[in-house]
Amino acid sequence: AFFQAWSLSTKSITRATERRDTASAAASLLDRIGTPDIPLQPGDYASNEAERPYWQVHVEHYEAGHAGPTRLLMVHILLAPQKGSNAVVEIETLRVPAGK
């Protein structure tokens, strides 16, 4: 029973560490939005499958319900320690394109 509890505890710590590291990478990725590798324009962008953490960014025009189209862009970010991992961090944010 001791070894089973220790094993479960170790796995929990590993998952928590993966999530913390992934969340930290998400903050760094947010800073890269609007740079040449992740332009702030509608489209889909992703890391290569070998890159860790694996990330995807989807940018689209934001529509505010009945108000219709706005100049804002919705940015959806998904990060995982590796492709297919369950330790996923997702972020949605609004951005204003430069010079608008």
Image: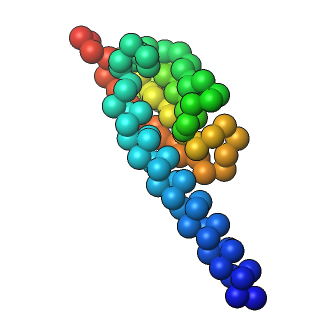
What is the residue that sits farthest to the bottom in this orientation?
Answer: 1
Q: Residue 14: which quarter of the image?
A: bottom right
> Is 17 situated left or right of 30 in this image?
right
Residue drawn at (53%, 61%) of the image: 16
Q: Where is residue 19? Give x, y as percent.
A: 52, 54
The number of numbered discs placed on residues in the rendered structure image is 0
Of the pair 84 and 72, the residue shown nearer to us: 84
Residue drawn at (44%, 40%) of the image: 26
> Is 64 situated left or right of 12 in this image?
left
Of the pair 29 and 11, the residue shown nearer to us: 11
Q: Where is residue 81? Give x, y as percent.
A: 58, 44
Query: How is the structure coloured here?
Result: rainbow
Q: Residue 39: which quarter of the image?
A: top left
What is the residue that sits farthest to the left in this orientation?
Answer: 99
Q: Is residue 60 above or below residue 4?
A: above
Residue 69 visible in the current orientation: no
Residue drawn at (54%, 53%) of the image: 18
Quadrant where the N terminus is found in the figure: bottom right
Residue 17 visible in the current orientation: yes
Residue drawn at (64%, 28%) of the image: 49
